[in-house]
Structures are given as C-alpha cells and as structure tokens.
Amino acid sequence: MSVIVNLQLKAKEGQAPAVLEMFRNLLPGTRAYEGCHWVKAVRNLDDENVIEAVSQWNSKNHYDAYLEWRVDTGALAALAELLDAEPVFRFLPVELEY
C-alpha cells in the first residue's frame, strides 16, 4: 500500500525563501529516490512561513530509507537551522485511488 507523506515546516521569520530554495535543490533528488512517485512543495495561504512537502511513496519503509539518506547527507540539519519549530511528519496510507 502506498503512503502519502506530509512534512510540515514552520520557517523562521524571513526564512521561507531560503527553505524554498533549499527545496529547489533537494526535491529533484527526492523525486529520483527509489520508491518516490511524486513530491510537491506547497505554502500555507494564511501563513507564508508554513511550508509543506507532500509526497507519495511505495511504502513507509521506502520513505524511511530516503529520510535516513537525507540525515546522513546533512540536509536535515541544514534545514533545521531555518526552522522555528520541529518538523511534523504525517504518514497517510492511501486507501482509495482513482
């Protein structure tokens, strides 16, 4: 069963453009990672400092392997420097797809 992963981020005031620039550099590698169907970066209409990465994966295990790779490369530590709060990860199993 595939899974939608919703990574919710709260950028420090004025750092949202830097987070999006980091995503511009990182997300092509995310999309190319084994098990990733697609990935999108979105912003909250009511709070420009809230940025989310939404992606679909073959399984949570595929995402976990990807996340471990990102931790090992230092990308998550660099991203954390731009954030005002801990990232929130939501894992949503796909029950129906049309």
Image (tube, rainbow, N blue to C red):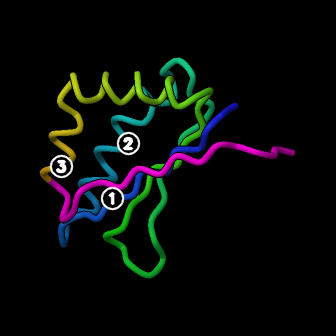
**Residue 89 against residue 29 in the figure, above or below:** below
Instruction: Report the mark closest to the observer, 1 or 2.
Output: 1
> Looking at the rendering, which quadrant does residue 43 occupy?
bottom left
| Residue assigned mark 3 | 80
In this rendering, position of residue 45 left or right of residue 86: right
Q: In which quarter of the image is the C terminus?
A: top right
Which secondary structure, mark 1? strand
| Residue assigned mark 2 | 24
Which secondary structure, mark 3? helix
Q: Which residue lies furthest to the top in this view?
A: 34
Residue at left offset 18%, top offset 67%:
12
| Residue assigned mark 1 | 9
Q: Position of residue 7 (x, y in %)?
A: 42, 51
Q: What residue type is labelled 2?
A: Arg
Q: Where is residue 76 in the image (x, y as percent from the top left)?
A: 23, 38
Residue at left offset 48%, top offset 21%:
33
In this rendering, position of residue 54 left or right of residue 22: right
In this rendering, position of residue 26 left or right of residue 86: right
Q: Which amino acid does label 3 sit on?
A: Ala
**Residue 52 against residue 46 in the figure, above or below:** above
Q: Where is residue 83 in the image (x, y as percent from the top left)?
A: 20, 59
Q: Do the residues labelled 1 and 2 touch (CB within 8 Å)?
A: no
Residue 93 falls inside the magenta stretch: yes
* Disc 1 to disc 3, C-alpha distance: 9 Å
* Disc 2 to disc 3, C-alpha distance: 16 Å
Magenta-highlighted stretch: main secondary structure?
loop
Q: Position of residue 91 (x, y in %)?
A: 52, 46
Residue at left offset 43%, top offset 57%:
52
* Magenta span: 82-98
